[in-house]
Image: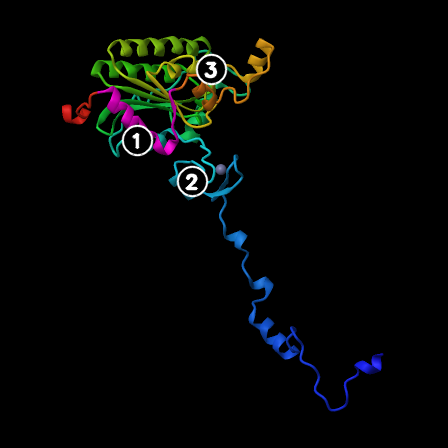
């Protein structure tokens, strides 16, 4: 059999169908850079340039995420947004004037857990660049002058202590005096336990200020973001003439486990989500972050007569 495959003397060897002859092979490999010389692409990507979406697991370029107001461009998951960026996204450019910017908490109870309250405050101040969990002030939104408070969850879980309560109360009182609408963007784990009863008193104080504001027939819009819970939800966050939420925000008072244990019953699906509460009438609307400014301006157009800007009226 092997004899049959032998080339007859003098005939050319058959050309290979795919494999190039050895001389050609050498030149094509020689053109390619050696493996050790190629730079690893991975090494060129600096850390913190990409974020993985916890909802759809897509990798998002950080710059794209920032430009999109921290909303996943693939599945519209709303990442937490800091108070300063939130104000930028809502107020007319350059119109926000902060009030009570230097108000800080005192450690009246000298509370100590894993760390002292004073140490925790310092840590969060340096980490966030904030003095406490809320920024308050006045700004122009569309053609309206508004009193705006924005909470920041990064500062001790957006908890409401004396400073948050006092800043919000002062803002509402000033708005009542100047006959301006109030908008509060909430994001909170509830009352601040390090301040004990002083925290709980803020619920009554802020609610009373809202009641006086309402008596003056002035509008208050409450915007809930993920998560808005406990003492904040049980006071000013749920007292809006309009209550709006971002999509899929967790909204509630006590945690689901506590409620389940207390009521001894199974909780319905989607319990404590914005969508569940919209269906049952607690919310008036769910508005995506990128449309929030436009929607709020529209609501203000319905609720208020456009007032001259604060600077123009001076
Ligand atoms: Zn996503």
Magenta region: 284-304
| Residue named by callout 1 | 294
- Residue 237 horizontal side relative to residue 58, left or right: left
Query: Residue at point 38% right, 40% down?
Result: 67
Q: Residues within 10 Å of mark 3 (few under 14, many from 20)?
A: many
Q: Could you say whether the residue bearing mark 3 is in a helix, strand or loop?
A: helix
Q: Could you say whether the residue bearing mark 1 is in a helix, strand or loop?
A: helix
Quadrant in which the C terminus appears: top left
Prevailing SS of the magenta stretch: helix
| Residue named by callout 2 | 65
Question: For the residues marked 3 and 2, what is the alpha-carbon distance in whole angstroms?
Answer: 30 Å
Which mark is first along the chain, 2 or 3? Answer: 2
x then y, percent, for residue 302? 25, 22
Q: Which mark is residue 230?
A: 3
Residue 28 lies in the magenta stretch:
no
- Residue 91 horizontal side relative to residue 190, left or right: left
- Residue 302 horizontal side relative to residue 271, left or right: left
Q: Are marks 1 and 3 in contact (CB under 8 Å)?
A: no
Q: Is residue 309 above or below residue 70?
A: above
Query: Residue at point 28% right, 11% down?
Result: 214
């Amino acid at each position: 059999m092997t004899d049959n495959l032998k080339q007859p003397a003098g005939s050319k060897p058959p050309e290979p169908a795919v494999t190039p002859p050895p001389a050609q092979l050498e030149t094509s490999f020689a053109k390619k850079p050696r493996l050790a010389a190629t730079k690893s692409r991975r090494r060129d990507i600096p850390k913190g340039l990409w974020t993985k979406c916890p909802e759809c697991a897509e990798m998002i370029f950080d710059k794209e995420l920032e430009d999109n107001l921290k909303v996943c461009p693939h599945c519209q998951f709303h990442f937490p947004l800091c108070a300063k960026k939130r104000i930028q996204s809502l107020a007319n450019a350059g119109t926000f004037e902060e009030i009570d910017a230097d108000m800080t908490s005192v450690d009246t109870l000298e509370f100590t857990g894993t760390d002292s309250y004073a140490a925790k405050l310092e840590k969060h101040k340096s980490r966030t660049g904030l003095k406490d969990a809320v920024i308050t002030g006045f700004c122009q939104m569309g053609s309206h002058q508004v009193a705006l408070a924005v909470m920041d969850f990064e500062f001790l879980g957006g908890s409401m202590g004396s400073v948050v309560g006092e800043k919000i109360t002062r803002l509402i009182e000033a708005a009542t005096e100047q006959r301006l609408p109030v908008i509060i963007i909430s994001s909170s784990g509830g009352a601040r336990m390090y301040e004990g009863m002083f925290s709980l008193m803020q619920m009554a104080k802020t609610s009373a200020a809202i009641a006086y504001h309402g008596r003056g027939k002035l509008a208050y819009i409450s915007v809930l973001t993920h998560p808005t819970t406990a003492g904040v939800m049980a006071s000013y966050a749920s007292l809006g003439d309009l209550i709006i939420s971002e999509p899929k925000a967790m909204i509630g008072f006590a945690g689901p486990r506590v409620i389940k244990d207390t009521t001894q019953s199974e909780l319905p699906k989607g319990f404590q989500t914005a969508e569940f509460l919209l269906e049952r009438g607690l919310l008036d609307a769910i508005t995506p972050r990128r449309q929030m400014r436009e929607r709020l301006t529209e609501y203000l157009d319905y609720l208020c007569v456009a007032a001259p800007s604060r600077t123009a009226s001076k």
